[in-house]
Amino acid sequence: MGVVKMADNIRMRAQLKGEITEVKLLMTHPMETGRRKNDSGDVIPANFIQTVTAMLNGKVLLQAEWGTGISKNPYLTFRMRGAKVGDVVRIDWTDNQGKTGVGEISVTLG
């Protein structure tokens, strides 16, 4: 059905419907703000996705800079024109601790 799971941190779908391709992705990440405390009263260190890049066949479609206001396990949807069945959508993210996530999927008919 065109869903891929890579590195256990991104699930994706890219479906062409008419002229529009809709990309949906779910990123597994704790998205800690650095202000919350654990049960012992200690502050949980900040751990959040800072940059997200989406590419189509290697060409950058969008770049986003996120902060601590994004919830745990962020969900992102975007739409684009000009993609064809078989084109490759790639998502890369990097968090404030240097960890990364990568997802790649081919566009399918929706």
Image (cartoon, rainbow, N blue to C red):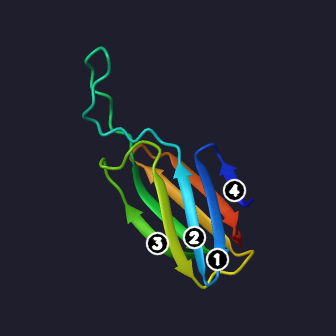
Q: Earlier in the sequence, mark 4 or mark 3?
A: 4
Q: Earlier in the sequence, mark 2 or mark 1?
A: 1
Q: Label 3: how many residues lie within 10 Å, few (<14), some (14-19) or many (20+)?
A: few
Q: Depth-wise, is mark 4 or mark 3 nearer the camera?
A: 4
Q: Residue 69 versus residue 57: which sits nearer the camera?
A: 69
Figure check: 14 above or below 96: below
Q: Which amino acid lies under the numbered mark 4 shown in the image of this protein? A: Val
Q: Which amino acid lies under the numbered mark 1 shown in the image of this protein? A: Lys
Residue at figure coordinates x 65%, y 69% from the top left: 15
The residue under label 4 is: 3
Q: Earlier in the sequence, mark 4 or mark 1?
A: 4
Q: Label 1: how many residues lie within 10 Å, few (<14), some (14-19) or many (20+)?
A: few
Residue at figure coordinates x 29%, y 14% from the top left: 40
Image-based side of 48 in relation to 107, left or right? left
Marker count (numbered): 4
The residue under label 1 is: 17
Q: CA distance from mark 4 to mark 3?
A: 20 Å
The residue under label 3 is: 62
